[in-house]
Amino acid sequence: MSARQAWALVRDTVREAGARWVFWGFYGLSTALILFFLFLLRIDVIEGARATVTLFGETSPRAVPVERLVRGFQGAVAAFLYVAGMGLAIFASAGLMAAVVEPGRIEWLLSKPLPRTRLLLWRFAGNVLLVCVNVSYLVVGVWLILGSKTGIWDKSFLVAALTTTFMFVVLLSVVTLAVVLTGSAVLATMVAFALMVVSPLLAQHRLMVKLLDSEFWRDVWRFLYYVLPKVFEVGKINMDLLRGRPVESWMPVWSSALFAAVVLTLALVLFARRSY
Amino acid sequence: MSDDAAIETHGLTRIFRRRWRGGEVRAVDGVTLRVERGTSFGLLGPNGAGKTTFVKLLLGIVTPTAGSARLLGVDFRRPEARQAVGYLPENHRLPSYWTAAGLLDFAGALSGMDPGARRRRIPELLELVGLREWADVRLSRYSKGMLQRLGLAQALIHSPALLFLDEPTDGVDPVGRQQIRAILRELEERGVTVFVNSHLLGEVEMFCREVAIMDHGRIVASGKVKDLTAGKGYRLTAARVPEAAFEELRALAVTAAYRDGLAEFQFRTREEVNRAVDLVRAQGGWLESIIPTSSTLEEVFMRTVRAEAGEETR
């Protein structure tokens, strides 16, 4: 029975997303990028090693190594996806998470014979599924197009889908907690965006620790750096993997995963106890 | 606690603490109540009496501060307690992106019904609430009355043994109300326990066999409707009653008033009304009518709530 309920909740999330323009915009943007690579960008490979690019009838003045060209395009798509795509995904998903706790609807849902944690968890999963499908659609689509145009099938680009979805899950856990605490999609979005914005600043912790006078503020900075999700650094790992560079440290990944696990657990515990 | 009861509560309490101003509100205050299976039960009370909070407590929507309850013999804290329970919330907002058939399918799935059972049940229910032609129309195009009828249908999707309805006829036109009453009667005949929360006393009186009156979070009166409204009396209407006689009769009567130039008195006993008749005639007044009366639920309600308010002020 729980599988039936889980599937119903995921289906409900997908259905609700379908009724919101922002999700169509999200998929539309991915489709536009795919169409750009498919029709507008022409890549002429010269003797299998170098290539020229033609865009809107303008051809690049000199040929560049094909591999570098493909990696460049893939890097641009991955960066765009990681920053703009994720921002849009958070914006769209916050509304979906907040809809569950809307007065008049939450009472109805909670009266059903299923544990509260499951109700929230499957809505969370539905959101992740929607974003994962969209991100994979874009990444795999661009990978297939670039591969078929250049003959370079660089699988490391596919990791971009994984890292973007991973960081989305981390930020969605924050959105979920904010929604459980406040019921506000706007506030939840703001909190997630704030974490995205402060992440590059916190990432400069070595420099900041040297610059700060007070030991107290140095500790505060270190604490925030280690506790909060490392959006910037996971993004850097994403690019390193894409370019075949060795990853310096996986700490940003596991500490962000730990953060998400704690925050999501807290959200579930609070949701299970809350009165509506 | 006995398993025969559809609902059984013991000292159920919910206290809301005011975060900023301090103090507390006892929304539900030590309610002990028993509703037998197969009963149509009405919970009445003025706005803010705690009726909705009480139902929300039973359904696990609001967490209790103290007390215990069982729904159909199962501890109300467990999700299984809601397995055979249907609920139509007050001011519900059913997801408007579903069609009626889609929403019922979703509600059925959440209640654990298998797809085959849902497919069979949905057309039946849509027919029952008069929405068959609207099965594939999105809820965003429904009127309030239609949404209310659909709300009832979703509460019935899994053929519950216990049904909670919070203001079920809210926003429904008279024809729709009659339809809802007929559905509820049919359910009662099938042995479904129907618990109605309403401020529409007439509705409750027409449908429910048992009621409880709630005020300030407490049950202040409860029993069978026929017992509560059994307080019989006589209404005497007379014309040209002199002032001195009116004052004398006022002292004797339960209520006394002038309405449309006529004096109206309510007496409890036959002896009292006979004495009043003698007095009116002796003072030169004209009798218009003497009508035997029984209390309406509204009168019982008003009397109880006023008595409670009196208690509060004392």
Image (cartoon, coloured by chain):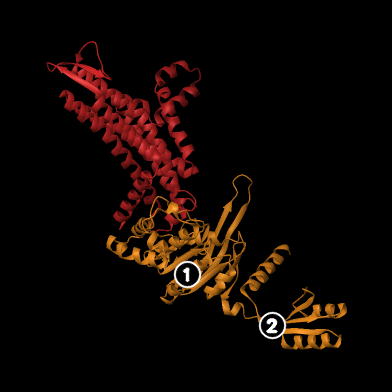
Q: Name the side, left or right, on which B227 lies relative to A275.
A: right
Q: Residue at x 16, y 24 (%)?
A: A152
Mark 2 or mark 1: whose residue is earlier in sequence: 1
Label 1 is placed on what type of residue?
Gln
Pinpoint residue B300: horizontal percent, then vertical percent: 64, 73
Pinpoint residue A251: horizontal percent, then vertical percent: 32, 28
> B304 above or below A42?
below
Q: Is residue B4 visible?
A: no
Label 2 is placed on what type of residue?
Gly
Q: Of residues A92 and A184, which is closer to you in this image?
A: A92
> A21 above or below B205?
above
Answer few, some or many: residues within 10 Å of disc 2's Cα (few below 14, many 20 plus, some between 14 and 19). Answer: some
Query: Are the numbered discs 2 and 1 placed on the same chain, yes or no?
Result: yes
Q: Can residue B142 be seen in this view?
A: yes
**Callout count:** 2
Q: Which residue is drawn at 34% across and 25% down?
A: A233
Chain letter, colour red:
A
Q: In which quarter of the image is the N terminus of chain A?
A: bottom left
Q: Which residue is drawn at 46% across and 71% down?
A: B184
Q: Mark 1 points at which residue?
A: B179
Q: Which residue is drawn at 46% across and 61% down?
A: B88
Chain letter, colour orange:
B
Chain letter of mark 1 equals: B
Q: Name the residue under label 2.
A: B233
Q: Of residues B29 and B121, which is closer to you in this image?
A: B121
Pinpoint residue B46: horizontal percent, then vertical percent: 62, 63
Q: Which of marks 2 and 1 is in front?
A: 1
